[in-house]
Amino acid sequence: MWEGDRSKFPEIIDGKPVIDLDSQKYVKIWQGPQHPGVTGNIALEVTLCGDEVVDLKTHVGYLHRGFEKLLERRTWMQGFTIVCRICVPEPDTNEYLFAAGVEELSGITVPAKAEWIRTLTLEMARLASFLMWLGGQAAAFGMGTVGQWTVAHRDFLLDIFEELSGGRIYHMYIVPGGVRADLPKGLDRRLEDVLKKIEILLKDVDRVLFNNAIFKLRSRGLGIVTRDMVDSYGVVGPVARAAGLARDLRKDHPYLVYEKLDFDIITATGSDAFTRAQVRFKEMYQCIDLIRQILSRMPDSGDFYTPVPNVLHWKIPAGATFVQAEASRGEYGYYMVSDGTAYPRRIAVRGPSYSHAIALLQKLAINTNIADLAGLMVSLQTCPPEIER
Amino acid sequence: MSLRDIISPFYVWKRAFSKPFTTKKPLSDRPGAPRYRGFHKNDLNKCIGCGTCETICQNEAIDLVPVPGIETTLEDSGLRPRIDYGRCCWCALCVDICTTDSLTMSNEYVWIDADADVFRFVPGYDEKEWQHQDRGYRRSEEYRLLHPQRTDMKMLDPVTGVGSFLEIVQGYSREQAIREAMRCVDCGICVASCPAHMDIPDYIRAIRNDDLEEGLRLLYQTNPLPGVCGRICTHRCEEVCSLGVKGEPIAIRWLKRYIVDQVESSSFRDILQQEFVPNGKKVAVIGAGPGGLSAAYYLNRMGYSVTIYEKYPLPGGMLRYGVPEYRLPYDQLDKDISYLLTLGIILERDKQVGKDIGFQDIYQQYDAIFFSTGLSVSYKLEIPGEELPGVIPGLQILAEVTQGLKPVIGRQVAVIGGGNVAMDAARTCRRLGADVTVVYRRREEDMPADREEIEEAKSEGVKFIIQAIPVKISRSSAGKLEFFWNEATMVSQGEGQRPRPEAIPGAVRQLEVDTLIPAIGQGSDLAFLSEDRQNQIEFRKYKVKVDYLGQTSDPRIFAGGDIVNPTADAISAIADGYRAASGIDKFLRK
Ligand SMILES: Cc1cc2nc3c(=O)[nH]c(=O)nc-3n(C[C@H](O)[C@H](O)[C@H](O)COP(=O)(O)OP(=O)(O)OC[C@H]3O[C@@H](n4cnc5c(N)ncnc54)[C@H](O)[C@@H]3O)c2cc1C
Ligand code: SF4
């Protein structure tokens, strides 16, 4: 926020700026829906006074593909093939939650080995998603190089996903009943090699980004989320943790094998873009550590799949459930309703971006510099596909 | 902020000179992972064209299409999946559900072509370089979407079985039947192999939906003796079931039985609702076996007034007088037949055509005739001593048991033959308390009897002598029958031919028994037809020759059942009855 003479800025009445566009004091511009400074396809309708944002509206819908509706026309098994598409950077959370919901509604228990493997894929997915964020975060403040590195390293992880699941982006690996295949021989070793590469990368990133005067100057104090905003704006995940709240579904409502793993919730108090980056950065190390724990403790043998009824005629008893998991961006949930038929009656998907990219961003953008808007957005790790299901 | 924060970012240069991570084209040094879900492969010889891949694909990316060089047979639709890569999302559900495991995927990453049409092809037929490569996605052994194991059927244990005539197969409960019906993939490949082309996938669906009334309606569309067929049908449908390729076929026969067993006979009329308008025409049916009953039923539904002439007091033909009670209880046979007789079909019992009423009379009184008089004359062994007392044909023993006469067979019994009639006679004699030995000319694997019949006979203590050629029968001084047989070796008859048994010189063996039961086949008795008629009607290989409508060379006479078809089982007789009913209708409407 410009600290000097603010008389030229709009008057605030009842917490809202009074903007008279005809006064020629303000400019309205659109950032997006196609713009390198937005995450995915989303549009920010920005009103500026000078280079300071005085009002912001988020426009969504450019990516709407109607997944929730499409799911109503697919059988319970067919559904697993499209939920991954709801979130490109982190499809596995969707795969897991869809399967977990179906299993809960139909009373199916998956074998222990499948739970370990699922946890492994979720942590790999969080790590891959953080790598993507990290590159974006650096680039948003002008340092594209880091993005080149992290995206390449994400690709190393995708190699592992490809080996495990047969797909790089859309893994389609977690199915109702378990997972589709056991870990390929030697995957643990190859995954460990990738983790080592990522650790070296993180060290480099620490040097060039977290000890970078420009990054510090621009991200510190940017987009401060106060503690009381956390609940009123539906703030979750690293953004909430950076505001000092020890909230993590993996600890608060443990699922899969998280209870058996040794880790602490990472929190901080600065609650600005810089602190959030630090929290995520630490969570990346946490992912690496969790992956290692899983690989060393996972049972060698055992079933990874519980047969479900013939999927061509599978009807699930009427009922409803809400299942959730901690994605890299925070709490992710599936509300699923069965009316007793072979098709879901309703599936509603709720990801963190829904509140982060709309209400929260609209609030935090006010009084920031237009140049920092992209960095702010990435610091909330918003992902439009997840808003428009 | 420190000086370090200004200098530190220059560390990026460290990576400026390191080897790039990217891979150059072509990607041959970086093939897709072994599990990669790339373009499909299909082993055309394993594939049976069941179309389950087409059913599961949510993108309708698969069409089953005819492919040159692949013939349609009973176990192969002759079609193969063609995949449209404009729609495929590479989920591999089609691979996971493939009933034969013929469909897999390659690990092919990249394929570029300017012609969009090439991206729709028949894997395995349209030659692609990856078709014969090993790598690529296939279903893991431990993960399967289909259920290969059949739901267990409760059976009477052999000890109780052999001590009574109680039914051996106990039938499915509701929960078991639904579980078994759930296994079905709805491909419908079975329909063609059923002589009556029953609507199998749909009645199985009715079971899944727990809608037995619908199931019953579907059964009666093509089969008026479903309770019978649900027990003793030769179930050729199960032989071609696509689930049977990698696992056990669906228990189609037992599912059919389940529907009939669950519905009270008193509600059949309401459920089937068979109102019809009489058309004033009359048809006579000779023989109340399955062929005759089936023709009568479908004619009745079309409005014909039908009279069946039956020489025995009770209807059912060989189903009653041949098939033993432990496989087909009389009350279950009666349940099927008594419903048919409530519909207005007239049954003239104890009326043997040719004796109690002349064929010519019937010919004059009715608009058309259907005859299905079956095979009632047992073939002779054609060996010396066959006329001795104590040599009793299998059919006769079985009929006597049905009639409630207790046949006198003594302690030691030998049954000659390897077909189902031989097994029925042997197992019936076991139930009458005898020690039974089956004697057969060829090897066990050559026996025409169903595998399960042979196994059950063994479990009930029936002994088997194989490769044994009957020589003669004589009476011993102790009053027993001495049966002489010659050990045989099997002599190859060339490719595709069944090997023939040939007597080993000097290897004659002897068996002492009280009763000897030949059961080596049976022929027809057409004495009810005058000689003129017998000459007029055409025969082929000892069977009455009919056309595709069941019509004989006399246009007013139709025939079916064992005297016509080569398969000689209940369902073929039923199908013949249906065919002749439509044929008669077509003929009389002209
Ligand atoms: C022991 C045995 C076991 C069998 N087991 C099986 C089995 O498990 N599964 C299977 O599918 N099939 C089985 N079959 C075969 C099956 O029973 C026959 O294929 C079927 O019954 C043939 O039906 P149909 O109508 O042609 O003749 P039939 O059932 O033989 O009926 C002919 C009817 O015509 C009557 N008839 C004959 N001549 C006259 C006349 N002149 N006047 C009036 N009435 C007359 C007879 O009394 C009889 O009722 C078995 C057969 C036998 C003998
Ligand atoms: S891979 Fe999936 S989308 Fe493609 S043809 Fe098979 S089932 Fe259809």
Image (cartoon, rainbow, N blue to C red):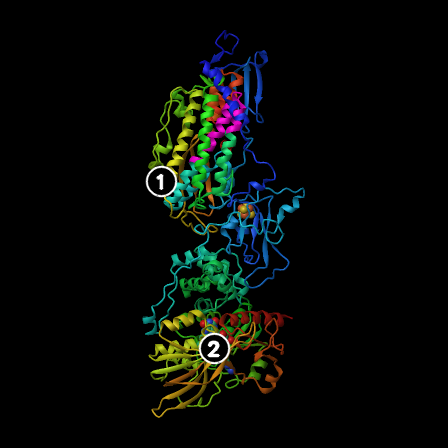
- Mark 1, other Cα within 10 Å: few <14 / some 14–19 / many ≥20: few
Q: Residue A297 carries which label?
A: 1
Give the residue drawn at x 66%, y 46%.
B117
Q: Where is residue B63 in the image (x, y as percent from the top left)?
A: 59, 51
Query: Which region of the structure is painted magenta?
Result: A123-149
Give the residue drawn at x 54%, y 52%.
B103
The one of B363 and A103 positioned closer to us in this rendering: A103
Quarter of the image for residue B412 reads bottom left
Q: Is residue A146 magenta?
A: yes
Q: Distance between the residues labelled 1 and 2?
A: 61 Å
- Chain at tag 1: A
The one of A161 and A46 positioned closer to us in this rendering: A161
Would you place residue B121 above or below residue A35 in this image?
below
Mark 1 lies on a secondary structure that is: helix
- Mark 2, other Cα within 10 Å: few <14 / some 14–19 / many ≥20: many
- Chain at tag 2: B
Q: Main secondary structure of the magenta part?
A: helix
Would you place residue A359 above or below residue B271 in this image?
above
Mark 2 lies on a secondary structure that is: loop
Identity, as a three-letter code, of the amino acid under mark 1:
Arg
Q: How many marks?
A: 2
Q: Where is residue A35 in the image (x, y as percent from the top left)?
A: 57, 25
Task: Give the left or right position of residue A262, taking residue A49 as reference.
Answer: left
Q: Are marks 1 and 2 on the same chain?
A: no
Q: Is residue A135 magenta?
A: yes
User: Is disc 2's CB within 8 Å of ligand 1?
Assistant: no
| Residue B315 visible from this viewpoint | no
Extreme residue toward the bottom, this view: B477
Query: Which residue is tagged 2?
Result: B442
Q: Where is residue B311 in the image (x, y as percent from the top left)?
A: 48, 81
